[in-house]
Amino acid sequence: MTLYDRGAFEQAHVRLRSAPGELTMADVEQLATFGGADLGREALAARKAALFPAPAVPAPAQAVNRGGLSEASIDAIAEGVVTFLAEHIRPILARLRAIAGPRQGRGQRALARRVQAGRTLSLGRAGDAPWVALGVPA
C-alpha cells in the first residue's frame, strides 16, 4: 500500500527528470500510483535505461575462422601436431611390432598389412578382441 505524500511525489518526479538512475522503487510506486500508469511505466523505463545501459553495437567481425585462427594457421598447427605424434608413436609401434610380430594370427597380420600400407586408422578383429591400429607412414 502506498500512501500519498506530496513531497515524496514531487521529489520522485524531479529525480525522474534529472537523475533517473537515483529513482528507487518507492519513487516509481509513487509516480505510478498518483501520477498514472503511463508515468509509472516511463519511470521504470528511465530507471532501467540509467542502471543498465544498452551495450555498444559491436564492430563487424573480421574474417576469422575457428576461434580466431585462419585456415593457414590451423593447417600449420595440425601439421606440427601430426609430426610430433608421428615421432613419438613410431618407436612405440616398432616395439609393438617386434613383440607381437611372430605371434600374429591371420587377422592381426591382415591388420598389420593395412597399417603398413599407409592407412592411418584401421579397425579390425583378431579372434574375439577388437583392434584399433594407428599407422604412421614410415
Image (spheres, rainbow, N blue to C red):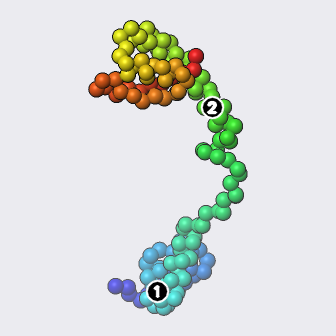
Q: Is residue 133 left or right of residue 73?
A: left
Q: Quadrant of residue 125?
A: top left
Residue 7 position (above or below residue 99)? below
Mark pair 2, 1: CA separation? 62 Å
Q: Nearer the viewer, mark 2 or mark 1?
A: 2
In this view, which residue lies farthest toward the front? 106
Whole-percent x, y for residue 101 in the image? 41, 10
Question: How many badges with numbers are in the image?
Answer: 2
* Mark carried by residue 123: none
Residue 56 position (above or below residue 20)? above
Whole-percent x, y for residue 24 in the image? 47, 74
In this view, which residue lies farthest toward the left? 128
Number of residues whose C-alpha sits closer than 10 Å to that of mark 2, classed few (under 14), some (14–19) or many (20 or more): few
Give the amino acid at mark 1. Ala
Task: Name the quarter where the N terminus is drawn.
Answer: bottom left
Whole-percent x, y for residue 23 in the image? 51, 75
Task: Name the quarter where the C terminus is drawn.
Answer: top right
Whole-percent x, y for residue 84 in the image? 57, 22
**Residue picked out by circle 1:** 32
Residue 78 position (above or below residue 69)? above
**Residue picked out by circle 2:** 77
Report the front residue among 56 and 134. 134
Q: What's the residue at 66%, 31% (across, down)?
A: 76
Q: Is residue 111 visible?
A: yes
Looking at the rendered structure, the secondary structure element under dot 1 is helix
Residue 57 position (above or below residue 110)? below
Q: What's the residue at 68%, 54% (across, down)?
A: 61
Of the numbered discs 2 and 1, the one sitting upstream in the chain is: 1
Report the front residue among 105 and 137. 105
Q: What's the residue at 50%, 83% (across, down)?
A: 41
Number of residues whose C-alpha sits closer than 10 Å to that of mark 1, classed few (under 14), some (14–19) or many (20 or more): some
Give the amino acid at mark 2. Ile
